[in-house]
Amino acid sequence: AAGVPLPGALLAVTGAAGSPALVALRALGLGDLLTAVPALRALRAAFPEHRVVLAAPAALAPLARLTGAVDELVPAAPLRPLPDRLAGADLAVNLHGRGPESHRVLLALRPRGLLAFASAAAGAAGPSWRADEHEVRRWCRLLAESGIPADPGDLALEPPPGPPPPWAPGATVLHPGAAAPARRW
């Protein structure tokens, strides 16, 4: 599957396909992507020379652009193989789960490095998973314990460009989270 370039994102500034790549996996829904925003921004700040590729559902591309952290979205489904063109990325980051299945999806790309929670079944080292942890803090802790500062409060999104739709002037959209307590706000 082809990637979905994000117009106006850093891809246009940093140049291009020859840039080192960082692949972040978050192939879930809207609330799931929102909980990963601070971690994605921390990755962008820590790896400014990398092309940040988010593996997530294609429908989330406009929202991914509003994070200011992602250069490209590659359409992905939960725990399904990722496109071969992502093979050999400098760094793969598992923002999808604790593994081992999601770790294996990223390890199949043969990245130079994997940033993930510890999983003996997938042969991955990393911080320990905490089941009762809110996901915003979870992903920031994964990075912080790996030496990448991340601010769990860095959640704000820029409004989409252009005027609001005529049926929603001044509207605010709230997404309260999901059925899982770790994604509730």
Image (cartoon, rainbow, N blue to C red):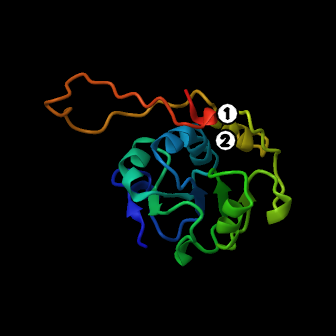
Q: Is residue 161 left or right of residue 154?
A: left
Residue farthest to the front? Answer: 179
Residue at the image position 45 percent from the left and 57 percent from the top:
57
Q: Position of residue 101 (x, y in %)?
A: 69, 63
User: Label for residue 139?
Assistant: 2
Q: Position of residue 164 (x, y in %)?
A: 21, 32
Q: Please identify the quadrant where the C terminus is shown.
A: top right
The three-letter code of the residue at mark 1 reads Arg
Residue at the image position 59 percent from the left and 56 percent from the top:
24
User: Label for residue 107?
Assistant: none
User: Label for residue 137?
Assistant: 1
Residue at the image position 57 percent from the left and 42 percent from the top:
36
Q: Is residue 159 left or right of residue 89?
A: left
* Location of residue 124 by image quarter: bottom right
Question: Pointer 2: residues within 10 angstroms few (<14), some, or many (20+)?
Answer: many
Cα distance in 3D space between marks 1 and 2: 6 Å
Q: Position of residue 19 (x, y in %)?
A: 54, 66
Local SS, label 1: helix
The three-letter code of the residue at mark 2 reads Trp
Q: Is residue 120 left or right of residue 101?
A: right
Q: Are marks 1 and 2 in contact (CB under 8 Å)?
A: yes
Q: Is residue 65 above or below residue 78?
A: above
Question: Pointer 1: residues within 10 angstroms few (<14), some, or many (20+)?
Answer: some
| Residue nearer the viewer, 74 or 81 | 81
Q: Is residue 147 left or right of residue 24?
A: right
Local SS, label 2: helix
